[in-house]
């Protein structure tokens, strides 16, 4: 009877080890895509930061170009006024 109990315990132990092994495999199969997704999120966050920095730089460039455009428009108006006054002479 004692041998049967040992055998039963051994078989139960082997079955549980087998189930545990398969659960660990499932866990690893699921964790790989999760790690890839985490890495993708980190990459996208970095790209977002770079894009925001580029957007900020472009905003400064646009502001600078608008100011330069205003200055050139003012110069053009002054030149037109000077030309008009020269023709009047």
Image (cartoon, rainbow, N blue to C red):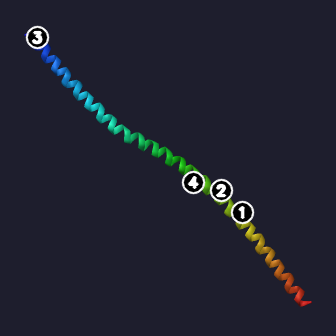
Marked residue nearer the N-terminal end (3 or 1): 3
Query: On residue 3, which mark appears?
Result: 3
Tag 4 and tag 2, C-beta contact below 8 Å: no
Q: Name the residue rendered at 16%, 21% in the picture.
A: 12
Residue under label 1: 64
For the residues labelled 2 and 1, the Cα–Cα distance comes to 11 Å
Residue 22 placement, left or right of 76? left
* Element under disc 3: helix
Q: Position of residue 51 (x, y in %)?
A: 57, 54
Q: Name the residue rendered at 10%, 9% in the picture.
A: 2
Quarter residue 27 falls in: top left
Marked residue nearer the N-terminal end (2 or 3): 3
For the residues labelled 4 and 2, the Cα–Cα distance comes to 10 Å
Quarter residue 14 falls in: top left
Q: Position of residue 40 (x, y in %)?
A: 46, 46
Query: In the picture shown, does residue 4 fall above or below 37?
Result: above
Marked residue nearer the N-terminal end (2 or 1): 2
For the residues labelled 1 and 4, the Cα–Cα distance comes to 20 Å
Q: Residues within 10 Å of mark 4 (few under 14, many from 20)?
A: few
Q: Residues within 10 Å of mark 3 (few under 14, many from 20)?
A: few
Query: On residue 51, which mark appears?
Result: 4
* Element under disc 4: helix
Residue under label 2: 57
Tag 2 and tag 1, C-beta contact below 8 Å: no
């Amino acid at each position: 009877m004692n041998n049967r109990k040992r055998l039963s315990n051994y078989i139960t132990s082997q079955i549980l080890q087998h189930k545990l092994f398969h659960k660990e495999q499932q866990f690893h199969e699921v964790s790989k895509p999760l790690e890839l997704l985490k890495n993708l999120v980190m990459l996208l966050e970095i790209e977002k930061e770079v894009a925001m920095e580029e957007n900020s730089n472009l905003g400064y460039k646009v502001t600078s170009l608008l100011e330069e455009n205003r200055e050139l428009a003012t110069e053009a108006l002054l030149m037109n006024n000077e030309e008009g006054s020269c023709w009047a002479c």
